[in-house]
Amino acid sequence: MARLSCGSSDDALDIVQDTMLHFARLYSGRPEGEWNVLFYKILHSRITDWYRRTAVRRRFHDWFGKSQDDDEDGDPMAGIADTTSPDPAEGAMRQEFTRALQAALGRLPLRQQQAFVLRAWEGFDTAQTARAM
């Protein structure tokens, strides 16, 4: 959900790590049945915070005349072949499906993206999704 929301694996890992630390610090004593909903509630808050910080950074970058892409060199691992799939056609179809799904989800508003992830990927029911969001 974090990677889908922010588009960067590194930023997503930072968001999830911050979420886990906050969750463990405040809610580790709560009943285990409440953990999923509490975790996703914190995650949603952290993603919203990330959007706010990113908007402020973007304004400063624009104000100083720097593009945000000036600092990025690209992913050095992008050129390495994926050896996880023995069948190249299956791997290509999986990549194409993943790109199409990410593109479709990227066109949705943030709250709808998160609702989809909670329902389809995490298996939450409607009540759990509502409490988490």
Image (tube, rainbow, N blue to C red):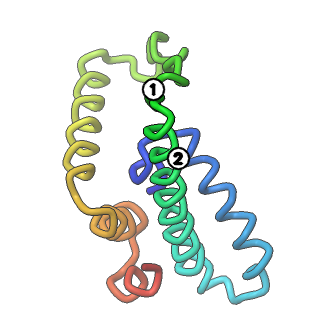
* Label 2 crowd bin: few (<14), some (14–19), many (20+), radius 10 Å: few
2 vs 1, front mark: 2
Q: Which of the two residues, 126 or 85, is positioned nearer the viewer here?
A: 126
Contact (CB < 8 A) between labels 2 and 1?
no
Tell me the quarter of the picture where residue 26 sits. Answer: bottom right
Where is 44 relative to 78, above or below? below
Where is 101 relative to 38, above or below? above
120 on left or right of 83: left
Count of labels in the image? 2
Which residue is painted at 38% across and 85% down in the image?
130
Instruction: Determine whether the residue tagged by mark 2 lies in a helix, strand or loop.
Output: helix
**Which residue type does callout 2 highlight?**
Arg
* Label 1 crowd bin: few (<14), some (14–19), many (20+), radius 10 Å: few
Tell me the quarter of the picture where residue 96 sits. Answer: top left
Percent of width and height locating residue 48: 48, 65
Pointer 2 residue: 57
- Spatial distance from mark 2 to mark 1, Cα to Cα? 13 Å
Disc marking residue 69: 1
